[in-house]
Image (spheres, rainbow, N blue to C red):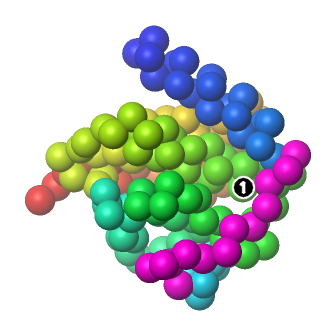
Amino acid sequence: MLKQALLCSALIAAAMATTAGAQQPQPGPGIDDTTAVTGAESRAANNDGAMLDAGRATMAVYDDATRTIYLAEGWNRTDPAELSILVHELVHHLQAGAQLRYECPQEREKLAYAAQERWLGLFNLTLASEFEMDPFTLLVRTRCLG
């Protein structure tokens, strides 16, 4: 638990520092620039960087192969909810850097959503209020079900 708290704190600090010079990256191999849309949901990726479609729009993707975070076109670095998306993706970047392995792609989302929720809490926001992420949806998106 302490390890997760330290990671969340580090991610929040990194997100704050990153926002001053954040730029929209160009799509790389395997990432279609048409995936940059404006829906209300972060994404899940497998260890190859492939996106899992849960029926909602993709706002960002982390590509493990290139260690690149792709943010939706129009991403707003001054909006705390949109910054939370970067925090979420930074967790995946740290997970990849640490070469952590998970039973399934959804399992690695647990810490990413926890960090995102903690970031949002700094602004009295929640995943539910900003992304319509109810507890059941969060449970399904962070557990290996098959």
Give the crowd class for mark 1: few <14, some 14-19, many >=20 residues within 10 Å.
Answer: some
Looking at numbered disc 1 in the image, what kind of residue is underneath it? Glu
136 sits to left or right of 145? right
Across and down, in percent, residue 58 comes to 53, 72
Q: Which residues are magenta?
A: 20-32
- Near-viewer residue (92 or 53): 92
94 sits to left or right of 14? left
27 sits to left or right of 62? right
| Residue at the left extreme, as displayed | 146
Instruction: Give the total number of marks visible in the rendering.
Output: 1
Q: Is residue 15 above or below residue 75?
A: above
Which quarter of the figure is the C terminus placed in? Answer: bottom left
Q: Is the magenta region chiefly helix, strand or loop?
A: loop
- Near-viewer residue (4 or 138): 4
Across and down, in percent, residue 144 comes to 19, 51
Residue topped by disc 1: 82
Q: Is residue 125 above or below residue 27?
A: above
| Point 47% across, 51% down: residue | 134
Across and down, in percent, residue 60 comes to 57, 64
140 sits to left or right of 113? left
Indicate yes or no whether the magenta region holds residue 22: yes
| Residue at the top extreme, as displayed | 2
| Point 44% across, 79% down: residue | 30
| Point 69% across, 68% down: residue | 25
| Point 53% across, 84% down: residue | 32
**Judging from the image, what secondary structure is the residue with disc 1 in?**
helix
Which quarter of the figure is the N terminus placed in? Answer: top left
Indicate yes or no whether the magenta region holds residue 9: no
The answer to whether any part of residue 45 appears in the image is: yes
Across and down, in percent, residue 133 comes to 50, 54
